[in-house]
Amino acid sequence: MSETIALCRWIRDRGKTVVSIALIALILATPAISVHAQSPTETPTASSPVSTAAPTPSASPSAAGQVILLAPDLKAFPTIGAYFIMRSADGAFVNLIQSNQVQVIEDNQNRPLSDMKQLQPGMRVIVAVNASPGMGVRNSQGQTRYDLVVRALQAWASLPATANNQDEFDLLANHVSPVSGLTNPLTWMAALNAYQPDFRNVTPSLDSLSAALMLAGSPPSRTGMGKSILYITGPLPQDSQSALGDLINQASQAGVAVNVWIVGSPDDFNTDGAKSLEKLAVQTRGQYVTFSGKEDLPSPEQYLKALRGIYLIHYQSAVKTSGSHTLVIKITGLANELSSPAQFFNLTVSPPNPMFLSPPVKITRAAPPGTADPLAHLSPTRQPLQILVEFPDGHSRALKYSRLYVDGKLVSENDSPPFDRFVWDISGYTQTGTHMLRVEVQDVLGLGRTSIETPVIIEVSLPPAMFETVLSRFNRWSALGAILAAGLITALILLWVWRRPKKGPMRQRARVKRKKEPPTRPIPARGESRRPGFQGWPERLSWPKRPPVEGAHLVQLIRLDDNNQPLTASPILLTGREMTFGRDPTQATLVVDAPGVEALHARLKLMEDGRAMLFDQNSKAGTWVNYLPVPPEGVTLNHDDIIHIGKVPFRFSSGQPGHLRKPVVASYNED
């Protein structure tokens, strides 16, 4: 009965001509309504917006629906994340898509899906008001049409479900400063209530709609947020209709629906300006509502609900080359398979770069003194080595393996973490020689690279031949007989020398002179020298002694990444008075295998007064301390200074954290 009364009122307001049109439309709509009733999957609501993000222009809805793919997230490459939206034919969000229905196609090749989640990141609700004189007409209770519109919005904003959503609200009006980015719907409603235009003196325009479209085209605060515009306006004046076509194209490119509430008298709804607004809503897949003050306004949640969902997927990329690549999401298991338009993304991919971290220049193998077989007891037998793996493309990723080669032969391999440590078995090296070391790594993408060869000297130091060693080569009794014979021969030689007669004039004069010496002459005690000023030969020899390097154990270098965070937990220690940096292992004690580093790049010296000074060795890329170039005369290092050998950063530690360099800000012009 109520529907009949409403139809009669509608016919009365619009006249005979409109009645005829309405009857024809009702007849034509009857079959469509019956078909719609047979489809349980469609939502019987008004047309809703399509996209929550700016899709490609080809992402137009089809009769079966559409898949909208957002730009992929490459931060965690080779793990790639992507958001996509599944829409039904009427624009509603399709819930509960299963992971086995989703296919990821990268560069025309299927990739396995790692995980998938359905999220509700919230909506950006933009209300744009174009005030017109028709909004100020009052009803019998003294309420204007605009007051009734505000009341309908207030009822929606006061719902608990609206407050619990992660929505953002914006309010735009002609000739008024915009209110943007509000997260509390009640605060947004307070701003809407505070806007009270003078309807008698307002001039309608498209300014608020144009500003709303610009706001909708800006990046959202959260990835995957939907966006929708509610345009509250009267009929457009004739001079504004020509500019509406450009705004429709702008809305389509931004992927945002424009819902139009046209407020005015019933006669205003048949004007050309009203028809232009209806075209705006239809072409952007928004909702078109006419309100004269007597109709019930719909809740905005009816068309916002269909935009609140989005899917997030992750997969392992197989991209191995730099350049442009494509990504497509395909949905299966439906009546018709749907695929998203291809999203293009650019990647820079390069192999990992391994290098030795403080490799030893020389390893000395020695046996304990007195060892019967020194070659069998040489130590050390194992040498630990550590490497550093850099990713020049900026995408750190896992490794498949790391391998250590010595003189071209594979001696150690890691196929599980840790990949940056090796133990070199040197027990088989019994002769002094130089050996060439290099390391090879390969990442999960199959990209690999080897380091430059680093020479390491293995020095074999054998003890002098000991008497016990000789004894061990003979029978015990034979050795004892040889010892007794040697002792007897030695005793006979000494006795013969002692008993040999002393002849000659020199001996006679010595006897005469000895007789004339007074008996009171002091006789030197045993062990004292018989000549004045004479010293024993051990006292006269000057044995070279190596002065200890004070404070050297306190000087350390810590390798850093591009964010000045430590790359390794183990510091690099200064064991002598000097450390050199460079690419050439024969010139540098600390090999830095990186672009821009010279064969001999820089030198670190520990001075006699305890200062540590850094000198540049005429390198092209330069040596830097706290982002300032090192002068030719060098620079004194302080605790916690940042050193750059070319572009490779280190942190200097002197064990004296109290002495920190005062920050210096200076400009640097590169020639």
Image (cartoon, helix red, strand yellow):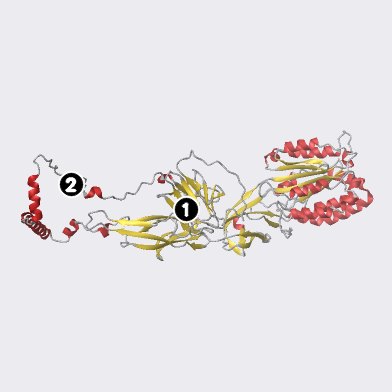
Q: Position of residue 142 (x, y in %)?
A: 88, 33
Q: Position of residue 187 (x, y in %)?
A: 73, 36
Discs 1, 2 touching: Cβ within 8 Å = no
Q: Residues within 10 Å of mark 1 (few under 14, many from 20)?
A: many
Relative to 52, say whether 175 is above or below: above
| Quarter of the image where the C terminus is located | bottom right
Outermost residue on the right side: it is 16
Quickly name the residue at label 2.
Answer: 531
Res 401 visible: yes
- Asked whether 454 or 249 is in front, the reply is 454
Q: Give the secondary structure at mark 1.
A: strand
Q: Is residue 70 left or right of residue 554?
A: right
Q: Nearer the N terminus, badge 1 or badge 2?
A: 2
Outermost residue on the top side: it is 141
Q: Give the secondary structure at mark 2.
A: loop
Total numbered circles: 2
Q: Quadrant of residue 361?
A: bottom left
Amino acid, disc 1: Arg
Quickly name the residue at label 1.
Answer: 603
Res 158 visible: no
1 vs 2, front mark: 2
Q: Position of residue 614 (x, y in %)?
A: 49, 50
- Asked whether 39 or 363 is in front, the reply is 363
| Quarter of the image where the N terminus is located | top right
As measured in the structure, the alpha-carbon distance from the residue carrying label 1 to the one carrying label 2 is 53 Å
Amino acid, disc 2: Arg
Q: Quadrant of residue 516?
A: top left
Q: Is residue 318 left or right of residue 455?
A: right
